[in-house]
Amino acid sequence: MGYRYDDQNIFAKILRGEIPCDNVLETEHSLAFRDIRPQAPVHVLVIPKGPYVTYDHFALEASDAEIADFTRAVGQVCQQLGVQPGTGGSGYRVISNAGGDGVQEVPHLHVHIMSGRMLGRMVSAG
Ligand code: 5GP
């Protein structure tokens, strides 16, 4: 409802193989790769392969199979990176930016998984 997907965005080009990425994980419906400008020692992006702009878009309109696959992919990436606090990892933060207030640069849903340093408070003062 009202979501307009721009298939020329950079992650669409990565999904089509037009631009390379440092691949971490690929599943049926999701792809994970390292952020080109890492803001922490570990900084991985997880994206669905489908044309979803934001987390809410995906959560409302993706199929159950896509949602399950994406959620599992986030877990698998955390496992692969060894960041899970439950198994001795140092912890991590998952962030998804959306729209103007969220300061979203790339209009294809992605979650950032960041780890490897103390990340500070959840958001800065402004
Ligand atoms: P946003 O602000 O949309 O949540 O973050 C977009 C992220 O995508 C940024 O952290 C940025 O560094 C990353 N990014 C932008 N272009 C590329 C690219 O071509 N390759 C990779 N791997 N990451 C990118």
Image (tube, rainbow, N blue to C red):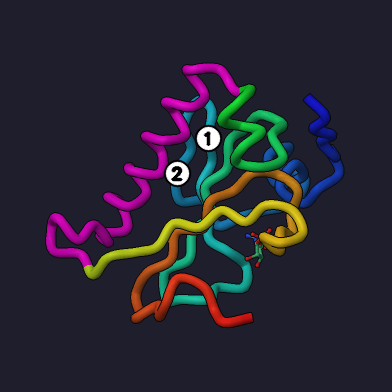
Residue 42 sits inside the magenta stretch: no
User: Please, is residue 87 above or below residue 53 in the view?
Assistant: below
Quadrant position of residue 124: bottom right
Look at label 2 and name its amino acid: Leu
Query: Which residue is rendered at x = 64% and y = 44% of the image?
Result: 109
Q: Circle 1 sits on which residue?
A: 30
Nearer the viewer's eye, disc 2 or disc 1? Answer: 1
Query: Which residue is rendered at x = 44% and y = 57% of the image?
Result: 94
Query: Percent x, y for residue 14?
Result: 70, 46
Q: Is residue 92 left or right of residue 108?
A: left
Q: Is residue 103 left or right of residue 58?
A: right
Query: Percent x, y for residue 6?
Result: 85, 40
Given the current orientation, which residue lies at the most extreme front position? 125
Q: Circle 2 sits on which residue?
A: 25
Earlier along the polypeptide chain: callout 2 or callout 1? 2
Q: Quadrant of ligand 1?
A: bottom right
Query: Which residue is rendered at x = 71% and y = 58% of the image?
Result: 104
In what element is the residue under mark 2?
A: strand
- Residue extent of the magenta highlight: 62-89
